[in-house]
Image: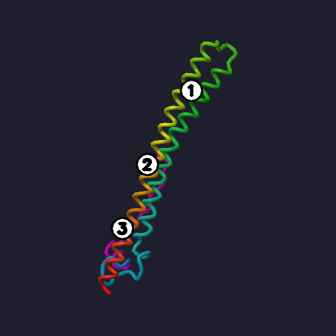
Amino acid sequence: RNGLGTFGCFAVSATDCLRCEGADHRPPETFDNSEGTQIPALRKQLHLQAQKRFLAFVKAPLLDLRTHLRSIMAHLSDAGTREEKRRQSESIVRKHSAMFKKAVVAALEDLEACAADQLENRLQMKIRKGAQDGGRG
């Protein structure tokens, strides 16, 4: 199991949804509102799955770092560990900390790009809807 949970089953009507949301000037044939078409629920589910995947992507380096640090701490805590080994362990910790930092920076950059894309998409939808509404008036 991938930890992303289950994905719902949706019986959708994209045409009626577009019509209910005003993107198509014709009247809907089956549904009175966009929620009835299940398109909004499907959108929500898709966004949730994307967020879960992103969280799993961000969480993996944290879990790896925690595992490495526990191993190193156990090694350093052992009374038989020589001073030379302790210095080598410090080098290993620095290496893994640098890798972790790179992974976190990459994840934050991805998150920032995703947020910017979502904002741009929402603005474009509002602009198109405004242009359509203005064209009818």
Main SS type for the magenta part?
A: loop
Q: Is residue 1 visible?
A: no
Residue wearing tag 3: 124
Span highlighted in magenta in the image: 1-20
Report the side of 63 relative to 117 (left or right): right
Question: Where 55 sits versus 47, above or below?
Answer: above
Comparing 3 with 106, the one in front is 106
Query: SS of the residue at dot 2?
Result: helix
Tell me which amino acid carries mark 1.
Val
Residue wearing tag 2: 110
Report the side of 131 relative to 53 (left or right): left
Q: Quadrant of residue 119?
A: bottom left
Residue at the bottom extreme of this rendering = 137
Q: Is residue 68 visible?
A: yes
Q: Are marks 2 and 3 in contact (CB under 8 Å)?
A: no
Disc 2/disc 3 C-alpha distance (Å): 21 Å
Tell me which amino acid carries mark 2.
Asp
Comparing 19 with 82, the one in front is 82
Report the side of 78 relative to 45 (left or right): right
Q: Residues within 10 Å of mark 1 (few under 14, many from 20)?
A: some
Tell me which amino acid carries mark 3.
Gln
Residue 125 badge: none
Query: SS of the residue at dot 1?
Result: helix
